[in-house]
Image (spheres, rainbow, N blue to C red):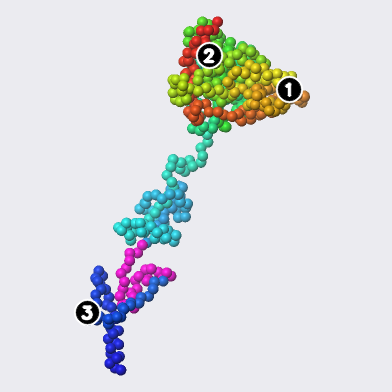
Amino acid sequence: MADSADRGRRRKKRLIIPPMKPGGRERESEQDNPQPGKTLVILAKPHHDDQPHSESASKPNEGTGKSPARTPEIKAPTVLLKTRDGNEKEGSRSSSPGNVTSHSTTAVSHSSRDVCSSTAGSCPASSVGQQPVYQIQQKSGHITGDDQKLSLLPEMSTPVKLVDGENLQWCDNAMEFLVDQTNFYVVGILGLQGSGKSTVMSLLAGQLGEITGRQLFKPETRELRERGEHCTSGIDIYVTSERMILLDTQPLLSASVMDHMVQFEKKIPCGTDYRATENALQIQSLQITAFLLTVCHTVILVQDWFTDPNLLRFIQSAEMLKPATPTNPHELSASIEDTTDYYPHLVFLQNKCQRGDFSPSTVCDMEELLLNVFQNSKLKHTGSVWMEFIPIKDESLHMEVANLFLLPEREAEEKGVLPNYRGHPGFNSLGRSLTQQLMSVPRSTLTHTALSEKNWFHYAARMWEAVKKSSLFLEYGRLLP
């Protein structure tokens, strides 16, 4: 029994493994080799998740009598959060990772520990054991601080010159009020002197004072009317908040414009190739009309009495002399194959109408006359604007109705007397209806590609120079008596 007990104690001593030196290799003594057929099993206490990693790593293995090699401890990353003002603050909203700053430190969150453990495998060996620091800051861009608010579109307080009335030179004053967006609408107006063009433009702009009488576009005053002078010279431009570009022109075939040419001895804008000043005036009016027919989505022809056959014939001549639209808006000297024909919507506005003009039979007669005159025209003169309160004979022929709209006398409605039976809506009601219908007119592209407001401005400048230098107007002027 004693011999068996001694042999058991000697066997236990053989199972004790001496501690391993750092960097060394464990070797077994040849004298202490276990018996053949026996497998050496070393038991160790398992590592629990609830026990801190540093505590379990520092304690030696009690069963084996040795301390295991320490693994490099990975410290949790530090997440830097930056506010909109640029100050570092814990808990601010993150945008995008940025560069690391040496002086920026904040509290460490437990969720960032998982990020470090997931990215530790992709870090180089030299960075293992170092403290990774991440900085989350605002995305860099041109808009910072107070500039993060959406900038308002530029608005105009008064109209500015687009074409100078003295020498018919192009002006760049309106360029600063235009933006790079394609959702705009160009409306031009034509008419004789005193027909109410400026009043209609102020009505479309929404700045026609009902009480004060103030208008955005300066109307013809009583003094100018008595002297027979015109108010608008050249072409004025105004851009509304709805991005509607309004073009107000000088009166067509105006004797006042011709009188200024003779009285002040101005140089004839069209040159000295014409026999008389009245021929130069007619060519100048044709150039302005052809220009509007080229760069506008809708052109309004205003008349104060129905109808002037000479004015309608004048519009047809301008349509004939209108230059073709180039396929490439940056190249105006294109061949015939590279040009297309663009024609805007033409609206006939009968201004200062009397009570009898609003009868359904009179309106139908007006529409029939306009349809017969422009039956061979390529201008879009039907199916866009109509009198809503006047019934149409055949609803199926709605698209074949002429673009005719009537406005009554404005002064008669502003009187303080109780209104009598007029037989038609008031001026303000019809003005709102006209504005809504014009805003809903289909807008076709001026060129084969969509233009922005600034591109339209440069395109209009080139088309104005092309109209002034066109040989068609020179040949037409030589045929005038």
**Residue 325 located within the stretch drawn in magenta:** no
Q: Which mark is residue 284?
A: 2
Q: Contact, CB < 8 Å: mark 3 with mark 1?
A: no
| Image quadrant containing the C terminus | top right
Q: Crowding at label 2, few (<14), some or many (≥20) Cα neighbours within 10 Å?
A: many
Q: Which residues are magenta?
A: 49-74
Q: Secondary structure at mark 2?
A: helix
Q: Nearer the viewer, mark 3 or mark 1?
A: 3
- Label 3 and label 1: CA atoms lie apart by 126 Å
Q: Would you place residue 289 above or below residue 109 in this image?
A: above
- For the image, the number of numbered tags is 3
Q: Is residue 101 left or right of residue 303?
A: left
In-front residue for pair 337/26: 337
Tag 1 residue: 360
Looking at the image, tell me whether mark 2 or mark 3 is earlier in sequence order.
3
Q: Nearer the viewer, mark 1 or mark 2?
A: 1
Q: Crowding at label 1, few (<14), some or many (≥20) Cα neighbours within 10 Å?
A: some
Q: Is residue 88 visible?
A: no
**Given the image, on which type of amino acid does mark 2 rest?**
Gln
Q: Which mark is residue 305?
A: none
Q: Residue furthest left?
A: 30
Looking at the image, tell me whether mark 3 or mark 1 is earlier in sequence order.
3
Q: Would you place residue 96 above or below residue 311 in this image?
A: below
Q: Is residue 397 left or right of residue 160?
A: right
Majority secondary structure of magenta residues: loop
Q: Contact, CB < 8 Å: mark 2 with mark 3?
A: no
Q: Which mark is residue 30?
A: 3
Q: Crowding at label 3, few (<14), some or many (≥20) Cα neighbours within 10 Å?
A: few
- Label 2 and label 3: CA atoms lie apart by 120 Å
Task: Please state the horizontal and vertical placement of residue 441, each as a whole percent of the image.
Answer: 60, 29
**Given the image, on which type of amino acid does mark 3 rest?**
Glu
Residue at 67% x, 27% y: name it: 398
